[in-house]
C-alpha cells in the first residue's frame, strides 16, 4: 500500500527581481518586482509502507522543499501530496499524529529541560500509552546509548548527543512515516553509525517508512534500498540503489604502488586520477578493458609492487553525474521504467 503519493508536484518561490545600481536598490525598496523560481518542477513518486528511501541531489536541488511539502509545512504551488490518505498541509494536526520529522540541526526538544522531561512531554502530547512509551524508551536508550544523557539538560549536550536524543524523540510515538532531512550533518562517524543502526532496526521491527536526505552518501549506502535522485527540481532517477550502481557505476578504481618510474605514465585504456613517484591512481571501465591489460600498459613505465581495487561507490557515481559525464541520466520515461 502506498503511504505517500506525489503527483505533478510543483513549488515555486516568489523572489524579488534585483535591479542594478543605487537607483535600482531604491526602486527595489519602494516597488519590489517579483518573479517566480520553481524549486520543485512537477515531480511524481509513490512510496510504499516500510520503504527506506534515500532522497538525494546536489545542494539546492529541492530536497528540503519537497520534504517540507510532505510534512505539511509548505503548501504546494500545484500538484498533489497525499500522505496516509490525507493532504498534509490541509490536515496538519491529523498528519502530525502519524509522522516524525528531523530537520538538520533544529531541535524539537526543550532547551532548558533534562532530556527525559522532553520525552515525557512528547508522551503527553501524543498520548502514547504507558507500556508503549516504556518499551520504546528502553529500546531507544539501548540502541542510541542514551543512558547517561537522559537527565542532562538539552543545552548541555554535544551535537552528537543532542541528535541521538532528537532521533529517539522523533520515533517515540511510533510514527508510520519519518522524514529525516540531513540528520547526520556535522556528526562524527561513530554517532552516524549509531543513528544508521537505529533507523535500520526500527524500520525492520515496526515497518516505519523512512525518507532520508543526507550529504553523507554512506548513510544512503548503509540504510536505503531505493534512491530518488533529484536534479534542479526534477527527478532523474527513481529506483533500486543497486540497479543504479550497476547501470552507472561501470568503472573501477585501482591504486598501484609503484617504483622505478622512468617517465610520466600515459595510458590508453584508463584514466589517471593521481600520479606520484610511487603511487598511481586510475579509473577504468571493467566492461571495456581488463585489469591485466591496464597493468600491461603501466608496467612499460615502472614496476608494480601492489594493487588495491575498489568498485565505484554511490558518491563516485554521483560526482560523475553532477559533472555531466552521464548525459544519459535525464528525466525520461525509458530510464525511469528501466529504473523502477
Ligand atoms: N523560502 C525560499 N525562498 C526562495 N527560494 C528558496 C526558498 N527556500 C529554498 N529556496 C531555493 O529553492 C531551491 C531548493 O532549495 P532546497 O529545497 O532547500 O534544496 P536542497 O534541500 O536540495 O538543498 C534552492 O535554489 C533555494 O535557494
Ligand atoms: Mg536541504
Image (cartoon, rainbow, N blue to C red):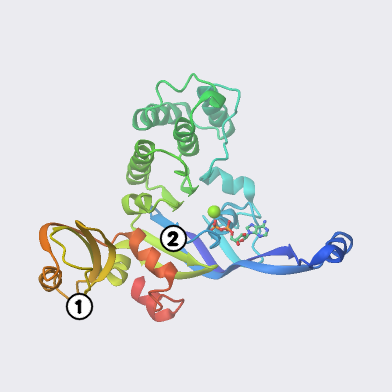
- The tag on residue 47 is 2
Residue depicted at 60% across the width and 28% down the height: 110
Give whichever of 273, 261 is nearer the camera.
Answer: 261
Residue depicted at 61% across the width and 23% down the height: 112
- Residue 93 image point, x, y percent: 63, 45
Tell me how far mark 1 sits from mark 2, CA to CA. Answer: 37 Å
Quadrant of the drawing holding the C terminus: bottom left
In terms of sequence position, does the residue under pointer 1 or pointer 2 come before the other? 2
Q: Secondary structure at mark 2?
A: strand
Given the current orientation, which residue lies at the most extreme right position?
30
Crowding near the residue tagged with mark 1, few <14, some 14–19, many ≥20 C-alpha atoms within 10 Å:
few
Crowding near the residue tagged with mark 2, few <14, some 14–19, many ≥20 C-alpha atoms within 10 Å:
some
Whether residue 144 is situated above or below residue 204 in the rendered picture:
above
Quadrant of the drawing holding the N terminus: bottom left
Q: Quadrant of residue 221?
A: bottom left
Of marks 1 and 2, the one in the foreground: 1
Question: In the shown orientation, is residue 132 left or right of residue 309?
Answer: right
Give whichever of 335, 289 is nearer the camera.
Answer: 289
Residue depicted at 39% across the width and 22% down the height: 147
- The tag on residue 313 is none
Asked if ligand 1 lies within 8 A of label 1, the reply is no
Give whichever of 232, 124 is nearer the camera.
Answer: 232
Residue at which label 1 appears: 288
Amino acid at each position: 500500500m502506498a503511504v505517500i503519493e506525489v503527483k505533478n508536484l510543483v513549488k515555486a518561490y516568489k523572489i524579488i527581481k534585483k535591479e542594478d545600481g543605487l537607483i535600482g536598490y531604491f526602486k527595489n525598496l519602494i516597488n519590489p518586482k517579483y518573479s517566480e523560481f520553481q524549486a520543485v518542477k512537477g515531480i511524481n513518486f509513490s512510496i510504499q509502507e516500510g520503504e527506506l528511501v534515500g532522497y538525494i541531489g546536489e545542494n539546492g536541488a529541492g530536497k528540503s522543499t519537497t520534504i517540507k511539502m510532505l510534512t505539511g509545512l509548505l503548501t504546494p504551488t500545484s500538484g498533489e501530496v497525499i500522505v496516509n490518505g490525507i493532504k498534509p498541509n490541509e490536515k496538519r494536526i491529523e498528519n502530525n499524529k502519524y509522522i516524525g520529522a528531523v530537520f538538520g540541526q533544529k531541535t524539537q526538544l526543550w532547551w532548558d529541560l533534562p532530556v527525559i522531561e522532553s520525552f515525557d512531554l512528547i508522551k503527553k502530547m501524543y498520548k502514547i500509552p504507558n507500556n508503549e512509551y516504556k518499551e520504546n524508551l528502553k529500546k531507544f536508550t539501548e540502541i542510541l546509548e542514551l543512558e547517561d544523557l537522559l537527565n542532562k539538560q538539552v543545552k548541555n549536550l554535544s551535537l552528537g548527543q543532542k541528535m541521538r536524543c532528537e532521533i529517539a524523540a522523533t520515533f517515540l510515538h511510533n510514527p508510520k512515516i519519518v522524514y529525516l532531512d540531513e540528520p547526520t550533518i556535522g556528526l562524527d562517524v561513530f554517532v552516524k553509525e549509531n543513528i544508521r543502526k537505529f533507523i535500520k532496526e526500527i524500520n525492520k521491527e515496526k515497518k516505519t517508512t523512512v525518507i532520508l536526505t543526507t550529504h553523507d552518501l554512506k548513510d544512503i549506502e548503509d540504510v536505503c534500498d531505493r534512491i530518488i535522485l533529484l536534479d534542479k527540481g526534477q527527478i532523474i532517477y527513481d529506483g533500486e540503489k543497486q540497479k543504479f550502481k550497476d547501470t552507472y557505476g561501470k568503472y573501477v578504481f585501482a591504486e598501484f604502488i609503484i617504483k622505478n618510474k622512468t617517465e610520466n605514465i600515459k595510458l590508453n585504456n584508463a584514466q589517471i586520477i593521481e600520479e606520484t613517484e610511487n603511487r598511481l591512481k586510475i579509473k577504468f571501465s571493467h566492461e571495456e578493458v581488463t585489469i591485466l591489460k591496464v597493468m600491461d600498459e603501466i608496467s612499460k613505465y615502472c614496476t608494480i609492487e601492489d594493487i588495491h581495487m575498489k568498485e565505484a561507490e554511490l558518491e563516485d557515481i554521483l560526482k560523475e553525474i553532477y559533472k555531466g559525464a552521464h548525459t544519459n541520466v535525464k528525466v525520461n520515461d525509458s530510464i525511469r521504467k528501466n529504473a523502477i
